[in-house]
Structures are given as C-alpha cells and as structure tokens.
C-alpha cells in the first residue's frame, strides 16, 4: 500500500474549533484518502466527532481551511457538503420513525414525476436495490419506528449511499449491529473502497480498526498525535498515541482504611432495546470508604448499571444488598431511604431544576428531614443548606439565587450536596467531572476523597483514564454490558484498561485474557 494508490481527496489544514469554554480541535492537519478506509480513534471527547461534523458541514472551523482536490472549500451547511459528495452516518440516528424506509432514504431529495408529484414507485424500487446491496431484506414500505436499531442503522447507511457519496463518514457504525450485520457492513465497505470511495471510520472497538483500516489518525485533546498507514500498527501504538505519557495530577493525598462491605450487586442483568443485554450479569462489592471506579466507553452499560441500582429502571434481574441485607425496594425513593444516592450524568436534565433556587434544589430529595407534620421548617432548611454550601465550598452570593446562575462546577457541587443531604451510605457518581473545568474537577475530586475518608462508599463511572487511574482504589472495566477486567489500584495500567475496554465483542467476548475477572 502506498500513498500513490490512495490520493488525498480532502484535507484539513490548521483546523481549530472553539466552543464556549473549550477548544475541541487545535491546529489539526488531517488527510482523507480516497479508495481507502481512514480510521479515526481517540478517547471520548478527543475531538473525533467535532472533526467529522466540520467535514460534513454541521459545524464550521473557527480557524483553518478545508481543501478538496487542492481547492479550498467552505461547507456552511450539510447541503453544501452533500453537493461535494460527502455523506455522514451519525452515531445518533437521524431518522423519522413515523415514515417508511423509502421516505426516510429520500427525505428532502424526493424522486418526482416532472417535478409535479412524488414518484413513490421509483423510490421504493431504488430502496429495494439499496437493501439488496446491503444484504438486508427490509420492505421499503415498513415504518422505520417498527425496525430494530440495527436495521435502522442500515437505513441510515442506505440513505448516504443513495446520494452517491464520494466520501462516507461512519461514526460508530457497528454500535447497534449484530455480529452478522457487522460482517455485511464490512463487505459493503470493501465494495465501496474498490469503487474509489473515501471512508472515514470512527470506532472505539480497536480490533475493528486493526482489521478494516488502511490509514489511521489518532486524536487526543483535540490534537492529532499520530497519523500513518495501518501497516505495522498494533494495539500498543494506538494506546500510546491515545493516552500519551503525561497524566493529570488527581492523585490521592493519603490512604485510609476501608470498613466492612456496604454494598453488593449479584448477577445484575438489564435487557437492551437493541436486543441482548445492556447489563450482562455484572457482580461487584463495595466497602465503606472505598472508591470503586467503573471505566468504559460509550455504550458499555455503565450508566445502565447505575440506573438499576438507584431504581431508575425496574425490569432488571439480579440481587442487590445494602450492609448485607437484601434490597427489596424498587422505587427511587425507596432506594434513597436505604442509603443510596446518585449523581446523574446530565446534571441539567436529571440533577437540577434550573428555575428553582440553589436552596430548593439542594433540599429536593430530603424535604422530609425538615418537615414536622404538614409544616416545613424553612429556618432549619436554610441552616442546613448554608452548612452544605460551606462544606462543599460552593461559590455563591445567596442560596436564593437561581441555580442556573452558577458555573458548571458549582452546579455540580449543588447536585452532590443534594445527594449528601439524604445521608447516603453509597454514593453513585456518573461522569462527575463532565462539563466542568480543570479547577472545578480538582475541587470535586477533593470532595470525593474527603467523603471516602469519612466512610462513604463511592462508585463512580468515567471514560477518562487519568481520573479513573488517580481516584480509584479498585477499577472495574466494562464493555458491551460485561465486566471485562478488574484491577486493584496498584496493578492497573492505562494500557491494560484500554485493552480491557475494547473486549466484549466477537469470539473472545467476555474473556479478559490476562485480566482478573470480577467475582
């Protein structure tokens, strides 16, 4: 394989994309080669999807240029990109469930008879041809909402193919596909490659990248850290370029002794809307004062596991124990009463009521503590809120201000305070540092360490390697709903965690190799 065989069809030079509060791309130089699979890899938040949105016309560069065939181009809309032969299949499907397969494929590009009315017959026939090409027997008249998620993904790919895209971007295309559907997709990709189509393939499943890629580009913190042909690339090279050598300093100051077991989960299962299991027989225990980190990538089943524990979903299987006693309560309020609290991943949607005051948000889950009969002691509530504002070092002029007036980091502290006011024994934290700056992260992590030192058992979910390595006393790795590795703090390495997080797919699914299985 040489670069002469695969000419550059699109380039980004000095690509920078700035959002309020963050730089998603930093002076990135990227070459997309035609007739080849250009794989793009990086941790969550590395800038992969931002770069692809720029190419697809969803976003525009703050600085830098896009070149096609040596000429500078500007994509102000997705239509601009489509006119230049660029198609994209997003990880989050963009379909109309109440319309047919054929209608979705030709949405906004309907086939017409002399420009007067829609030629439904021609659309159905073309949709059938695309389905045959994709080796799927899906009736063009079927409503998309009646299809399985994997079939919906096939419809998305067919929609891009119907536009005769010269460049096709596939963002996590196998996330919802079965093993058989993945093999079909790979055959289609091989056919497109032979036809000279330039394909960008984004996936967290590293074994897929090694199998299908012709060229590889690695992103870390918005910067390209490695770009080369795939020959000679191995897992170690990918991991080294993904995570680098430097780690953020979130390390613990002091160790403390753990108490007895405070929580145990046994064989937790949760059916997936895609078929199979979103949580696949997960078991673990937690001791008082211990911080258990759960590392994994998007779709690994981590958040779903926490939803089972807090009672956000009730159709799960398995057993839960608090301080050795079975937990029969099924409601969220019942779980809170047993000593479990959750810091949700999306604090704005699930953790806070933006139009309420800081005080009202803090006490939402613990109003019973301030009630005498039918009366609420506002004085006692105000005193308790003031105490937690001090303990959590929330920077606020008045607790009566709307919570939306606070910075992201201070809003996160309010969510944590709300959970702590329920006096939990087990604190579940889903991506506790998401959307807050480095200074606020450090403060949140100091709070976590202090709570653990006071005897609180903490389970926290993260896709950030630095965080899970520095904060955890013990680490579980999840992939495809399963625990694929368990590590003590002293034994964990970033390379081992990344390798374990890419397991759970294919013939070796569930076998962690040299990783110690969770008991």
Image (cartoon, rainbow, N blue to C red):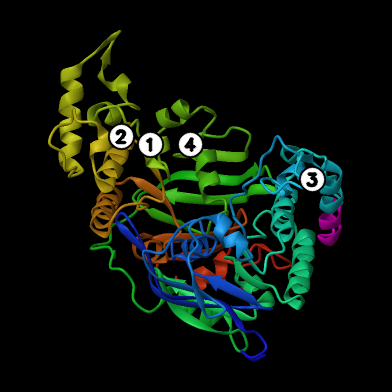
Mark 4 and mark 1: Cα distance apart in space? 14 Å
State yes or no: residue 130 in magenta: yes
Residue range corresponding to the magenta coloring? 128-135
Can you tell which of label 4 and label 3 is closer to the viewer? Answer: 3
Residue 283 — which label?
none
Question: Is residue 491 at all visible to an observer of this figure?
Answer: no
Q: Nearer the viewer, residue 224 or 112?
A: 112
Labels 2 and 1 touching (C-beta < 8 A)? yes
**Which secondary structure lies at badge 3?**
loop
Magenta stretch mostly in which secondary structure? helix
Residue 318 against residue 434 in the figure, above or below: above
**Dot 4 or dot 1, earlier in sequence:** 4
- x and y, in percent, of residue 104 in the image: 71, 45
Mark 4 and mark 2: Cα distance apart in space? 15 Å
Residue linked to disc 2:
418
Residue 351 — which label?
1
Q: Nearer the viewer, residue 94 or 268?
A: 94
Residue linked to disc 4:
310
The quarter of the rendered structure image containing the C terminus is bottom right
Mark 2 and mark 3: Cα distance apart in space? 63 Å
Near mark 4 (Cα within 10 A), the count class, few <14, some 14-19 or many ≥20, is many
**Dot 4 or dot 3, earlier in sequence:** 3
Labels 2 and 3 touching (C-beta < 8 A)? no
- x and y, in percent, of residue 259 in the image: 35, 49
Labels 4 and 1 touching (C-beta < 8 A)? no
Residue 241 against residue 359 in the figure, above or below: below
Can you tell which of label 4 and label 2 is closer to the viewer? Answer: 2
**Dot 2 or dot 3, earlier in sequence:** 3
Residue drawn at point x = 58 percent, y = 83 percent: 234
Can you tell which of label 1 and label 3 is closer to the viewer? Answer: 3
């Amino acid at each position: 394989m040489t670069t002469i065989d695969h000419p550059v069809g699109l380039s980004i030079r000095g690509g920078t994309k700035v959002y309020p509060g963050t730089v998603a791309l930093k002076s990135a130089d990227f070459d997309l080669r035609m007739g080849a699979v250009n794989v793009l890899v990086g941790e969550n938040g590395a800038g992969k999807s931002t770069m692809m949105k720029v190419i697809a016309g969803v976003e525009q560069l703050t600085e830098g240029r896009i070149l096609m065939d040596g000429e500078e181009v500007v994509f102000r809309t997705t239509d601009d990109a489509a006119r230049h032969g660029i198609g994209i299949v997003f990880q989050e499907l963009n379909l109309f469930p109440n319309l047919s397969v054929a209608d979705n494929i030709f949405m906004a590009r309907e086939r017409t008879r002399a420009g007067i009315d829609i030629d439904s017959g021609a659309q159905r026939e073309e949709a059938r041809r695309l389905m045959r090409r994709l080796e799927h027997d899906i009736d063009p008249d079927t409503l998309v909402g009646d299809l399985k998620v994997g079939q919906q993904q096939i419809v998305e790919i067919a929609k891009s193919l119907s536009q005769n895209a010269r460049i096709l971007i596939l963002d996590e295309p196998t996330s919802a596909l079965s093993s058989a559907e993945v093999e079909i997709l790979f055959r289609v990709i091989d056919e497109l490659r032979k036809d000279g189509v330039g394909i960008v393939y984004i996936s967290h499943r590293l074994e897929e990248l090694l199998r299908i890629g012709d060229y590889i580009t690695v992103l870390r913190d918005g910067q390209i850290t490695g770009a080369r042909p795939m020959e000679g690339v191995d897992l170690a090279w990918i991991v080294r370029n993904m995570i680098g050598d430097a780690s953020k300093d979130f390390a613990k100051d002091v160790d403390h002794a753990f108490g007895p077991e405070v929580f145990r989960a046994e064989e937790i299962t949760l059916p997936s809307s895609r078929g199979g299991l979103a949580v696949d027989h997960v078991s673990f225990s937690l001791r008082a004062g211990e911080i258990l980190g759960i590392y994994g990538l998007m779709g690994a089943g981590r958040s779903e596991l926490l939803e089972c524990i807090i009672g956000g979903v009730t159709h799960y299987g398995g057993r839960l124990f608090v301080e050795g006693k079975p937990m029969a309560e099924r409601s969220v309020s019942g779980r809170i009463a047993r000593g479990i609290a959750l810091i949700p991943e999306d604090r704005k949607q699930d953790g806070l009521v933006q139009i309420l005051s800081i005080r009202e948000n803090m006490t939402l889950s613990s109003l019973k503590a301030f009630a005498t009969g039918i009366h609420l002691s506002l004085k006692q509530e105000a005193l308790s809120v003031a105490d937690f504002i001090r303990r959590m070092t929330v920077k606020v002029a008045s607790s009566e201000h709307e919570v939306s007036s606070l910075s992201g980091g201070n809003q996160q502290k309010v969510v944590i305070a709300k959970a702590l006011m329920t006096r939990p024994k087990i604190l579940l934290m889903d991506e506790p540092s998401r959307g807050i700056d480095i200074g606020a992260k450090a403060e949140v992590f100091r709070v976590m360490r202090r709570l653990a030192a006071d005897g609180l058992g903490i389970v926290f979910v993260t896709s950030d390697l630095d965080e899970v390595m520095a904060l955890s006393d013990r680490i579980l790795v999840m992939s495809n709903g399963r625990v694929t590795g368990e590590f003590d703090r002293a034994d964990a390495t970033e390379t081992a965690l990344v390798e374990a997080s890419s397991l759970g797919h294919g013939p070796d699914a569930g076998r962690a190799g040299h990783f110690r299985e969770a008991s």
